[in-house]
Image (spheres, rainbow, N blue to C red):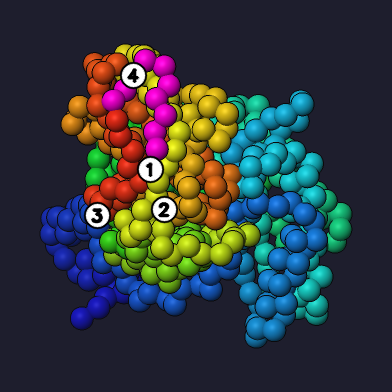
Amino acid sequence: MAYSRPQIRRSLATLPNICRTGVTSILLLVVALSALLPLQAAWAAPPPPFAVASYYISTIDPTTLFNQGCALGQRDRDLPGAQDNLVILAFGAPRGRNGSFGTLLFSNTFAASSQIATAVEAFARGYATCTGEDRASHLRIAIGTSNFGSQVTFSHGRAWAQLVTTVSQRIAAAGHASQVDVVGASDMEPDWNGPATTRAWVDGYASAFTQPLYNFGTAAGCPPFGSCGTSAHPEWTQEDIWYISWGAAPARPLPQIYLADGGNAQQWYQMSLYALTRHQRRMEFVGVLTQHQACQQVGCHPAVANSPQEGWSQFWDLLNSDSRTAQDLRWSADISWQTVGPPTPDLQANGAGTARLSGSLTDVGPVEGNFNYAFSSAVRGGATLGALNLDLTPVADLVVTEVDQLFLETDGATISGLGFLHPRNQPPSFVRTVRFRAHFQANHPGGVGDTFAIGFYDAVTGQKYGELGGPLIAGANTLR
Protein backbone atom coordinates (compact mmCIF):
# COMPACT_ATOMS: atom_id res chain seq x y z
CA MET A 1 0.00 0.00 0.00
CA ALA A 2 1.33 3.45 -0.87
CA TYR A 3 1.06 6.32 1.60
CA SER A 4 1.05 10.03 0.92
CA ARG A 5 3.15 12.35 3.07
CA PRO A 6 0.09 13.67 5.03
CA GLN A 7 -0.98 10.07 5.75
CA ILE A 8 2.47 9.25 7.09
CA ARG A 9 2.43 12.30 9.32
CA ARG A 10 -1.06 11.35 10.68
CA SER A 11 0.09 7.77 11.32
CA LEU A 12 3.13 8.97 13.24
CA ALA A 13 0.95 11.25 15.33
CA THR A 14 -0.98 8.24 16.67
CA LEU A 15 2.18 6.55 18.02
CA PRO A 16 3.51 7.01 21.54
CA ASN A 17 6.17 9.69 21.88
CA ILE A 18 9.13 7.32 22.14
CA CYS A 19 7.97 5.28 19.15
CA ARG A 20 7.30 8.40 17.12
CA THR A 21 10.84 9.63 17.81
CA GLY A 22 12.37 6.30 16.78
CA VAL A 23 10.36 6.01 13.57
CA THR A 24 11.17 9.59 12.64
CA SER A 25 14.88 8.94 13.13
CA ILE A 26 14.70 5.86 10.92
CA LEU A 27 12.90 7.81 8.18
CA LEU A 28 15.50 10.57 8.32
CA LEU A 29 18.27 7.98 8.09
CA VAL A 30 16.63 6.38 5.05
CA VAL A 31 16.31 9.77 3.35
CA ALA A 32 19.97 10.58 4.03
CA LEU A 33 21.16 7.22 2.74
CA SER A 34 19.06 7.56 -0.41
CA ALA A 35 21.24 10.48 -1.49
CA LEU A 36 24.28 8.21 -1.45
CA LEU A 37 22.93 4.90 -2.73
CA PRO A 38 21.82 4.21 -6.31
CA LEU A 39 18.10 3.71 -6.76
CA GLN A 40 16.25 2.40 -9.78
CA ALA A 41 14.94 5.24 -11.95
CA ALA A 42 11.16 5.49 -12.00
CA TRP A 43 10.56 6.23 -15.67
CA ALA A 44 10.90 4.44 -18.97
CA ALA A 45 13.35 5.52 -21.65
CA PRO A 46 11.91 8.01 -24.15
CA PRO A 47 12.72 7.66 -27.85
CA PRO A 48 16.09 9.20 -28.76
CA PRO A 49 15.98 12.68 -30.30
CA PHE A 50 16.61 12.97 -34.01
CA ALA A 51 20.35 13.25 -34.67
CA VAL A 52 21.39 16.09 -36.94
CA ALA A 53 24.63 16.09 -38.93
CA SER A 54 27.59 17.94 -37.43
CA TYR A 55 30.71 18.58 -39.50
CA TYR A 56 34.48 18.41 -39.52
CA ILE A 57 34.97 21.61 -41.51
CA SER A 58 37.28 21.59 -44.52
CA THR A 59 35.98 24.73 -46.27
CA ILE A 60 34.73 28.02 -44.89
CA ASP A 61 33.18 29.09 -48.19
CA PRO A 62 30.08 31.06 -47.10
CA THR A 63 27.93 29.64 -49.91
CA THR A 64 28.74 26.08 -48.86
CA LEU A 65 27.92 26.83 -45.23
CA PHE A 66 24.72 28.69 -46.20
CA ASN A 67 23.57 25.73 -48.26
CA GLN A 68 24.25 23.29 -45.44
CA GLY A 69 22.29 25.44 -43.01
CA CYS A 70 19.53 25.83 -45.58
CA ALA A 71 19.22 22.06 -46.04
CA LEU A 72 18.61 21.68 -42.30
CA GLY A 73 16.13 24.57 -42.35
CA GLN A 74 14.18 22.98 -45.20
CA ARG A 75 14.05 19.69 -43.34
CA ASP A 76 12.63 21.38 -40.25
CA ARG A 77 10.14 23.35 -42.36
CA ASP A 78 8.80 20.13 -43.86
CA LEU A 79 8.55 18.21 -40.58
CA PRO A 80 5.48 18.55 -38.37
CA GLY A 81 5.94 20.47 -35.14
CA ALA A 82 8.92 22.41 -33.79
CA GLN A 83 12.35 20.82 -34.16
CA ASP A 84 15.28 21.30 -31.79
CA ASN A 85 18.77 20.88 -33.25
CA LEU A 86 22.39 20.95 -32.14
CA VAL A 87 25.06 21.18 -34.85
CA ILE A 88 28.79 21.14 -34.10
CA LEU A 89 30.92 22.92 -36.68
CA ALA A 90 34.39 21.60 -35.86
CA PHE A 91 36.98 23.94 -37.38
CA GLY A 92 40.10 22.03 -36.38
CA ALA A 93 43.08 22.66 -34.12
CA PRO A 94 44.00 26.08 -32.68
CA ARG A 95 46.40 28.15 -34.76
CA GLY A 96 47.69 31.69 -34.96
CA ARG A 97 49.10 33.45 -37.98
CA ASN A 98 50.24 37.02 -38.62
CA GLY A 99 48.81 38.18 -35.33
CA SER A 100 45.41 36.54 -35.91
CA PHE A 101 43.96 33.62 -34.00
CA GLY A 102 42.10 30.89 -35.84
CA THR A 103 42.34 27.20 -36.65
CA LEU A 104 43.86 24.76 -39.09
CA LEU A 105 40.90 23.34 -40.99
CA PHE A 106 40.61 19.68 -41.92
CA SER A 107 41.78 20.63 -45.41
CA ASN A 108 45.12 21.70 -43.87
CA THR A 109 44.41 25.39 -44.51
CA PHE A 110 44.43 28.22 -41.99
CA ALA A 111 41.18 30.02 -41.18
CA ALA A 112 41.27 33.26 -39.20
CA SER A 113 38.65 33.95 -36.54
CA SER A 114 37.00 36.55 -38.75
CA GLN A 115 36.59 33.97 -41.53
CA ILE A 116 35.21 31.41 -39.11
CA ALA A 117 32.70 33.97 -37.84
CA THR A 118 31.51 34.65 -41.40
CA ALA A 119 31.16 30.92 -42.07
CA VAL A 120 29.06 30.33 -38.93
CA GLU A 121 26.88 33.35 -39.72
CA ALA A 122 26.28 31.94 -43.20
CA PHE A 123 25.15 28.60 -41.74
CA ALA A 124 22.82 30.41 -39.31
CA ARG A 125 21.42 32.63 -42.07
CA GLY A 126 20.84 29.63 -44.33
CA TYR A 127 18.90 27.86 -41.59
CA ALA A 128 16.77 30.88 -40.65
CA THR A 129 16.03 31.70 -44.29
CA CYS A 130 15.00 28.20 -45.33
CA THR A 131 12.74 27.38 -42.40
CA GLY A 132 10.29 29.71 -44.14
CA GLU A 133 7.18 30.20 -42.04
CA ASP A 134 8.38 27.75 -39.40
CA ARG A 135 9.60 30.16 -36.76
CA ALA A 136 9.26 27.72 -33.85
CA SER A 137 12.09 25.33 -34.74
CA HIS A 138 15.44 26.01 -33.12
CA LEU A 139 19.12 25.54 -33.97
CA ARG A 140 22.10 25.76 -31.62
CA ILE A 141 25.47 25.94 -33.34
CA ALA A 142 28.52 24.80 -31.37
CA ILE A 143 31.56 26.59 -32.79
CA GLY A 144 34.25 23.99 -32.30
CA THR A 145 38.02 23.70 -32.06
CA SER A 146 40.15 21.17 -30.12
CA ASN A 147 43.04 20.80 -27.67
CA PHE A 148 45.31 19.34 -30.36
CA GLY A 149 48.72 20.82 -31.09
CA SER A 150 51.20 23.30 -29.72
CA GLN A 151 49.02 26.42 -29.98
CA VAL A 152 46.47 25.48 -27.33
CA THR A 153 46.93 28.54 -25.12
CA PHE A 154 45.14 30.84 -22.69
CA SER A 155 45.19 33.58 -25.33
CA HIS A 156 43.62 31.35 -27.97
CA GLY A 157 40.90 30.29 -25.52
CA ARG A 158 40.12 33.92 -24.76
CA ALA A 159 40.03 34.76 -28.48
CA TRP A 160 37.67 31.83 -29.08
CA ALA A 161 35.25 33.16 -26.46
CA GLN A 162 35.37 36.57 -28.11
CA LEU A 163 34.69 34.94 -31.50
CA VAL A 164 31.60 33.19 -30.11
CA THR A 165 30.34 36.44 -28.60
CA THR A 166 30.83 38.28 -31.88
CA VAL A 167 28.85 35.67 -33.83
CA SER A 168 26.09 35.70 -31.22
CA GLN A 169 25.76 39.47 -31.49
CA ARG A 170 25.70 39.40 -35.29
CA ILE A 171 23.00 36.72 -35.35
CA ALA A 172 20.92 38.85 -33.02
CA ALA A 173 21.51 41.96 -35.15
CA ALA A 174 20.31 40.02 -38.20
CA GLY A 175 17.05 39.19 -36.42
CA HIS A 176 17.66 35.44 -36.10
CA ALA A 177 18.22 35.17 -32.33
CA SER A 178 14.77 33.69 -31.69
CA GLN A 179 15.66 30.71 -33.88
CA VAL A 180 19.45 30.38 -33.80
CA ASP A 181 21.96 30.68 -30.98
CA VAL A 182 25.62 29.74 -30.61
CA VAL A 183 27.97 28.31 -28.00
CA GLY A 184 31.68 27.64 -27.91
CA ALA A 185 32.95 24.08 -28.18
CA SER A 186 36.16 22.10 -28.11
CA ASP A 187 37.04 18.47 -28.74
CA MET A 188 39.25 18.02 -25.68
CA GLU A 189 40.98 14.64 -25.50
CA PRO A 190 43.67 13.35 -23.13
CA ASP A 191 45.43 11.74 -26.10
CA TRP A 192 46.19 15.11 -27.63
CA ASN A 193 47.56 17.38 -24.90
CA GLY A 194 48.26 17.60 -21.19
CA PRO A 195 45.77 18.76 -18.56
CA ALA A 196 47.68 21.93 -17.66
CA THR A 197 47.70 23.13 -21.26
CA THR A 198 44.05 22.20 -21.78
CA ARG A 199 42.97 23.84 -18.52
CA ALA A 200 44.80 27.01 -19.52
CA TRP A 201 42.84 27.19 -22.78
CA VAL A 202 39.57 26.67 -20.87
CA ASP A 203 40.58 29.39 -18.39
CA GLY A 204 41.23 31.70 -21.32
CA TYR A 205 37.74 31.01 -22.65
CA ALA A 206 36.28 31.55 -19.16
CA SER A 207 38.03 34.91 -18.88
CA ALA A 208 35.90 36.41 -21.66
CA PHE A 209 32.89 34.15 -22.18
CA THR A 210 29.27 35.14 -22.64
CA GLN A 211 28.15 31.75 -23.97
CA PRO A 212 28.74 28.21 -22.62
CA LEU A 213 31.60 25.98 -23.72
CA TYR A 214 30.72 22.41 -24.77
CA ASN A 215 33.42 19.78 -24.35
CA PHE A 216 32.73 17.21 -27.09
CA GLY A 217 35.78 15.16 -26.21
CA THR A 218 36.69 11.99 -24.31
CA ALA A 219 37.46 10.74 -20.83
CA ALA A 220 40.19 8.43 -22.14
CA GLY A 221 41.63 6.05 -19.58
CA CYS A 222 39.18 7.09 -16.87
CA PRO A 223 37.26 4.77 -14.50
CA PRO A 224 36.06 2.11 -14.66
CA PHE A 225 39.03 1.29 -16.93
CA GLY A 226 41.84 3.16 -15.18
CA SER A 227 42.66 6.34 -13.32
CA CYS A 228 42.45 8.57 -16.45
CA GLY A 229 45.22 9.54 -18.80
CA THR A 230 46.87 7.94 -21.81
CA SER A 231 50.31 6.72 -22.77
CA ALA A 232 50.89 10.15 -24.28
CA HIS A 233 49.64 12.12 -21.27
CA PRO A 234 49.29 9.88 -18.20
CA GLU A 235 49.03 12.87 -15.87
CA TRP A 236 45.29 13.37 -16.52
CA THR A 237 42.92 12.77 -13.60
CA GLN A 238 39.15 12.72 -13.14
CA GLU A 239 39.52 16.14 -11.54
CA ASP A 240 40.97 17.50 -14.78
CA ILE A 241 38.17 15.99 -16.89
CA TRP A 242 35.63 17.37 -14.42
CA TYR A 243 37.15 20.85 -14.60
CA ILE A 244 37.22 21.21 -18.39
CA SER A 245 33.76 19.64 -18.75
CA TRP A 246 31.80 20.95 -15.76
CA GLY A 247 33.90 22.66 -13.10
CA ALA A 248 34.97 25.74 -15.08
CA ALA A 249 32.25 28.37 -15.20
CA PRO A 250 31.29 28.02 -18.89
CA ALA A 251 31.93 24.26 -19.22
CA ARG A 252 29.23 21.76 -20.22
CA PRO A 253 29.82 18.11 -21.26
CA LEU A 254 28.77 16.72 -24.65
CA PRO A 255 30.65 13.41 -24.54
CA GLN A 256 31.70 11.14 -27.37
CA ILE A 257 29.81 7.86 -26.96
CA TYR A 258 31.47 5.93 -29.77
CA LEU A 259 32.19 2.50 -28.25
CA ALA A 260 29.61 -0.16 -29.09
CA ASP A 261 30.35 -2.05 -25.86
CA GLY A 262 29.20 0.90 -23.74
CA GLY A 263 32.68 1.75 -22.46
CA ASN A 264 32.41 5.48 -23.17
CA ALA A 265 29.00 5.64 -21.49
CA GLN A 266 30.43 3.98 -18.38
CA GLN A 267 33.31 6.47 -18.21
CA TRP A 268 31.02 9.49 -18.34
CA TYR A 269 28.53 7.97 -15.90
CA GLN A 270 31.46 7.61 -13.50
CA MET A 271 32.38 11.25 -14.19
CA SER A 272 28.90 12.35 -13.12
CA LEU A 273 29.25 10.36 -9.90
CA TYR A 274 32.69 11.86 -9.33
CA ALA A 275 31.24 15.36 -9.65
CA LEU A 276 28.55 14.48 -7.10
CA THR A 277 30.82 12.87 -4.53
CA ARG A 278 33.74 15.29 -4.81
CA HIS A 279 31.93 18.53 -5.62
CA GLN A 280 28.38 17.87 -4.36
CA ARG A 281 26.84 18.46 -7.78
CA ARG A 282 26.36 15.77 -10.38
CA MET A 283 27.58 16.36 -13.90
CA GLU A 284 24.70 17.15 -16.24
CA PHE A 285 25.05 16.49 -19.94
CA VAL A 286 23.70 18.48 -22.86
CA GLY A 287 23.58 15.39 -25.06
CA VAL A 288 25.64 12.74 -26.81
CA LEU A 289 28.01 12.76 -29.80
CA THR A 290 28.48 9.81 -32.15
CA GLN A 291 30.43 9.43 -35.41
CA HIS A 292 28.20 7.09 -37.37
CA GLN A 293 27.99 9.28 -40.48
CA ALA A 294 31.76 9.77 -40.57
CA CYS A 295 32.17 6.00 -40.33
CA GLN A 296 29.75 5.52 -43.20
CA GLN A 297 31.75 7.99 -45.28
CA VAL A 298 35.29 6.73 -44.78
CA GLY A 299 35.03 3.51 -42.83
CA CYS A 300 35.91 2.69 -39.24
CA HIS A 301 35.93 -0.32 -36.97
CA PRO A 302 32.49 -1.48 -35.74
CA ALA A 303 33.80 -1.16 -32.17
CA VAL A 304 33.66 2.65 -32.44
CA ALA A 305 30.67 3.02 -34.77
CA ASN A 306 27.68 3.49 -32.46
CA SER A 307 24.67 4.80 -34.32
CA PRO A 308 23.16 7.97 -32.83
CA GLN A 309 20.28 5.94 -31.44
CA GLU A 310 22.64 3.37 -29.90
CA GLY A 311 24.95 5.96 -28.37
CA TRP A 312 22.14 8.06 -26.93
CA SER A 313 20.23 5.06 -25.57
CA GLN A 314 23.34 3.50 -24.03
CA PHE A 315 24.08 6.65 -22.09
CA TRP A 316 20.49 7.52 -21.18
CA ASP A 317 19.84 4.01 -19.85
CA LEU A 318 23.00 4.01 -17.74
CA LEU A 319 22.46 7.49 -16.28
CA ASN A 320 18.83 6.77 -15.49
CA SER A 321 19.49 3.40 -13.87
CA ASP A 322 20.85 5.39 -10.92
CA SER A 323 18.79 8.03 -9.13
CA ARG A 324 21.95 9.99 -8.36
CA THR A 325 22.67 10.63 -12.05
CA ALA A 326 19.18 10.36 -13.58
CA GLN A 327 18.56 13.10 -16.14
CA ASP A 328 17.37 13.78 -19.65
CA LEU A 329 19.70 14.19 -22.63
CA ARG A 330 18.44 17.00 -24.82
CA TRP A 331 20.46 16.41 -27.98
CA SER A 332 21.95 13.70 -30.13
CA ALA A 333 24.69 14.92 -32.49
CA ASP A 334 26.41 12.83 -35.15
CA ILE A 335 29.67 14.05 -36.70
CA SER A 336 30.52 13.71 -40.40
CA TRP A 337 33.10 14.96 -42.88
CA GLN A 338 32.01 18.13 -44.62
CA THR A 339 33.62 16.95 -47.89
CA VAL A 340 34.83 13.47 -48.75
CA GLY A 341 36.24 11.71 -51.78
CA PRO A 342 35.61 8.27 -53.25
CA PRO A 343 36.01 5.24 -50.91
CA THR A 344 38.95 2.85 -51.13
CA PRO A 345 37.66 -0.38 -49.56
CA ASP A 346 40.67 -2.44 -50.63
CA LEU A 347 42.91 -0.52 -48.23
CA GLN A 348 40.80 -0.44 -45.09
CA ALA A 349 42.75 -0.38 -41.85
CA ASN A 350 41.47 -3.78 -40.72
CA GLY A 351 44.38 -5.40 -42.45
CA ALA A 352 42.71 -6.20 -45.75
CA GLY A 353 45.11 -5.22 -48.50
CA THR A 354 48.53 -3.73 -47.96
CA ALA A 355 49.76 -0.22 -47.44
CA ARG A 356 53.40 0.28 -48.42
CA LEU A 357 55.02 3.37 -47.02
CA SER A 358 58.19 5.16 -48.02
CA GLY A 359 60.30 7.56 -46.05
CA SER A 360 63.24 7.60 -43.67
CA LEU A 361 63.67 6.80 -40.01
CA THR A 362 66.40 8.55 -38.08
CA ASP A 363 67.84 8.01 -34.61
CA VAL A 364 67.56 11.42 -32.98
CA GLY A 365 68.69 10.40 -29.50
CA PRO A 366 67.05 10.65 -26.08
CA VAL A 367 64.54 13.35 -25.29
CA GLU A 368 63.54 13.85 -21.66
CA GLY A 369 64.83 10.40 -20.75
CA ASN A 370 63.10 8.66 -23.64
CA PHE A 371 64.74 7.30 -26.73
CA ASN A 372 63.22 9.05 -29.71
CA TYR A 373 62.86 8.34 -33.39
CA ALA A 374 61.93 10.83 -36.08
CA PHE A 375 60.24 9.70 -39.25
CA SER A 376 60.55 12.05 -42.18
CA SER A 377 58.64 11.72 -45.40
CA ALA A 378 60.47 11.52 -48.71
CA VAL A 379 57.74 13.50 -50.48
CA ARG A 380 58.33 16.44 -48.20
CA GLY A 381 61.96 16.72 -49.19
CA GLY A 382 63.22 14.56 -46.36
CA ALA A 383 62.68 17.30 -43.80
CA THR A 384 62.38 15.91 -40.29
CA LEU A 385 58.97 16.83 -38.93
CA GLY A 386 59.93 16.31 -35.32
CA ALA A 387 60.26 13.26 -33.18
CA LEU A 388 56.56 12.87 -32.51
CA ASN A 389 55.05 14.18 -35.73
CA LEU A 390 54.90 11.75 -38.61
CA ASP A 391 54.09 12.07 -42.27
CA LEU A 392 53.31 8.60 -43.54
CA THR A 393 53.05 8.55 -47.31
CA PRO A 394 51.22 5.58 -48.78
CA VAL A 395 51.97 4.64 -52.38
CA ALA A 396 48.22 4.10 -52.71
CA ASP A 397 45.34 5.74 -50.89
CA LEU A 398 45.10 4.64 -47.27
CA VAL A 399 42.29 4.60 -44.73
CA VAL A 400 43.19 4.78 -41.06
CA THR A 401 40.54 4.72 -38.34
CA GLU A 402 40.40 5.78 -34.72
CA VAL A 403 41.15 2.32 -33.39
CA ASP A 404 44.46 2.17 -35.27
CA GLN A 405 47.73 2.85 -33.50
CA LEU A 406 51.29 3.27 -34.58
CA PHE A 407 53.70 0.60 -33.40
CA LEU A 408 57.47 0.63 -33.19
CA GLU A 409 59.55 -2.48 -32.60
CA THR A 410 63.25 -2.40 -31.79
CA ASP A 411 65.25 -5.62 -31.53
CA GLY A 412 62.04 -7.60 -31.20
CA ALA A 413 60.66 -5.57 -28.28
CA THR A 414 57.36 -3.95 -29.24
CA ILE A 415 56.79 -0.41 -28.07
CA SER A 416 53.15 0.24 -28.78
CA GLY A 417 50.55 2.47 -27.18
CA LEU A 418 51.96 5.47 -29.02
CA GLY A 419 48.53 7.04 -28.84
CA PHE A 420 45.54 6.51 -31.06
CA LEU A 421 46.12 7.88 -34.51
CA HIS A 422 43.71 10.62 -35.36
CA PRO A 423 44.24 11.95 -38.88
CA ARG A 424 44.57 15.69 -38.63
CA ASN A 425 43.48 18.37 -41.04
CA GLN A 426 41.91 16.16 -43.69
CA PRO A 427 39.64 13.14 -44.00
CA PRO A 428 41.63 9.99 -43.18
CA SER A 429 41.68 8.70 -46.75
CA PHE A 430 41.84 9.73 -50.37
CA VAL A 431 45.07 11.62 -49.82
CA ARG A 432 48.63 10.78 -50.76
CA THR A 433 50.12 12.16 -47.56
CA VAL A 434 48.46 11.51 -44.22
CA ARG A 435 49.85 13.36 -41.22
CA PHE A 436 49.47 11.99 -37.73
CA ARG A 437 50.38 13.03 -34.25
CA ALA A 438 51.90 10.01 -32.52
CA HIS A 439 53.33 9.74 -29.04
CA PHE A 440 56.36 7.76 -27.90
CA GLN A 441 57.02 7.83 -24.17
CA ALA A 442 58.44 4.39 -23.42
CA ASN A 443 62.00 4.35 -22.13
CA HIS A 444 64.27 2.58 -24.59
CA PRO A 445 68.07 2.25 -24.23
CA GLY A 446 68.73 1.13 -27.82
CA GLY A 447 70.47 3.03 -30.54
CA VAL A 448 72.27 2.75 -33.84
CA GLY A 449 72.48 -0.85 -35.03
CA ASP A 450 69.08 -1.89 -33.64
CA THR A 451 66.69 -3.63 -35.93
CA PHE A 452 63.29 -2.00 -36.02
CA ALA A 453 59.87 -2.10 -37.60
CA ILE A 454 57.36 0.72 -37.79
CA GLY A 455 53.78 0.60 -39.00
CA PHE A 456 50.14 0.45 -37.97
CA TYR A 457 48.13 -2.05 -36.00
CA ASP A 458 44.45 -2.41 -35.26
CA ALA A 459 44.01 -1.90 -31.51
CA VAL A 460 40.94 -4.16 -31.46
CA THR A 461 42.24 -7.12 -33.48
CA GLY A 462 45.98 -6.59 -32.94
CA GLN A 463 46.58 -7.09 -36.66
CA LYS A 464 49.56 -5.21 -38.14
CA TYR A 465 49.74 -3.63 -41.57
CA GLY A 466 51.74 -1.07 -43.51
CA GLU A 467 54.90 -2.37 -41.84
CA LEU A 468 58.42 -1.22 -42.67
CA GLY A 469 61.64 -2.55 -41.21
CA GLY A 470 65.41 -2.72 -41.32
CA PRO A 471 68.54 -1.78 -39.37
CA LEU A 472 68.72 1.64 -37.79
CA ILE A 473 71.89 3.43 -38.90
CA ALA A 474 73.35 6.83 -38.18
CA GLY A 475 71.79 9.52 -40.35
CA ALA A 476 68.80 8.76 -42.56
CA ASN A 477 67.79 5.27 -43.57
CA THR A 478 65.47 5.16 -46.57
CA LEU A 479 62.83 2.47 -46.36
CA ARG A 480 61.01 0.91 -49.31
Q: Report the amino acid beneath label 2.
A: Thr
Q: Position of residue 324 (x, y in %)?
A: 32, 55
Which residue has dot 2 on it? 401
In three-dimensional space, the C-alpha distance between marks 3 and 4, rounded to whole angstroms, equals: 32 Å
Q: Report the amino acid beneath label 3.
A: Thr
- Label 3 Cα crowd, 10 Å radius (few <14 / some 14-19 / many 20+): few
| 130 in the magenta segment | no
- Label 1 Cα crowd, 10 Å radius (few <14 / some 14-19 / many 20+): many
Q: Earlier in the sequence, mark 3 or mark 2?
A: 2
Q: Earlier in the sequence, mark 3 or mark 1?
A: 1
Which residue has dot 1 on it? 420
Q: Earlier in the sequence, mark 3 or mark 4?
A: 3
Q: Quadrant of residue 3?
A: bottom left
Q: Which mark is residue 473?
A: 4
From this viewpoint, is residue 351 visible?
Answer: yes
Q: Report the amino acid beneath label 4.
A: Ile
